[in-house]
Amino acid sequence: MHLPPAASHRVVRSRWHLRVLLWIAGLGGLTCLGFAMTQPLSAAFFSLIAILVASAACALQAWRNAPVGLLRWDGQHWHWTALDTEQACQLTPVFDLQSVMLVSIHSAAGRKAWVWLEASSGGGNWAALRRAVFGSQRAQNAKHKPTAEDSLQDGDFA
């Protein structure tokens, strides 16, 4: 099996992710408004507003603190400058919408990060990055393909 060629992608805070957070906060606000129009104002309403504001603030803070850096595939291993620059890391695709991807990155030191990748923000060749993401995943799965010997338990016979 041939591994995909080298590719790199600049990782920035995802505008798509921010838009989703804003939509969710907006829907929560509309829910509160609907609740306020049908019920008399009470402690439950103010609790709902407080929960909405607190969760929106936490989500925006997490978005602001999202890791940024350069994600690079050298043809053999993934490297990400926001983790350990000299050590290879493992990248796993989690969610794919063609022009937006959520990936999980695990460093050799045990650190883990979830990163949104966008076609519009990388400044590189998105198609090459996608080939590298899914090609490296296929190669990793091929390395760890279970064999008949792996499935045998103590006392089992082939």
Image (tube, rainbow, N blue to C red):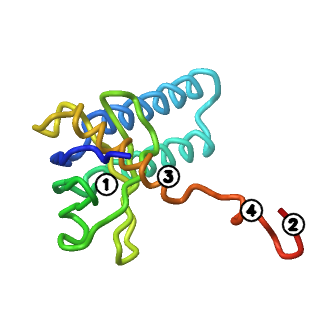
Q: Amino acid at mark 2?
A: Phe
Packing grade of label 3 (10 A; few <14, some 14-19, many >=20) is few
- The residue that disc 2 covers is 157
- In the shown orientation, is residue 137 left or right of residue 7? right
Q: Amino acid at mark 4?
A: Ser
Q: Secondary structure at mark 3?
A: helix
Question: In the image, which disc is placed on residue 142?
Answer: 3
Q: Amino acid at mark 3?
A: Ala
- The residue that disc 4 covers is 151
Give the residue drawn at x 27%, y 44%.
Answer: 4
Q: Secondary structure at mark 2?
A: loop
Packing grade of label 1 (10 A; few <14, some 14-19, many >=20) is few
- Of the residues under marks 2 and 1, which one precedes in the sequence? 1
- Give percent across and percent down for residue 90: 37, 61
Q: Nearer the viewer, residue 40 or 56?
A: 56
Mark 1 and mark 3: Cα distance apart in space: 39 Å
- Of the residues under marks 1 and 3, which one precedes in the sequence? 1
Q: Across the whole image, how many numbered discs are drawn on residues?
A: 4
Give the residue drawn at x 21%, y 33%.
Answer: 126
Question: In the image, which disc is placed on residue 61?
Answer: 1
Which quadrant would the C terminus be assigned to in this image?
A: bottom right
- Give percent across and percent down for residue 75: 23, 53
- Give percent across and percent down for residue 104: 40, 54
Of all residues, the one furthest to the front in this rendering is 158
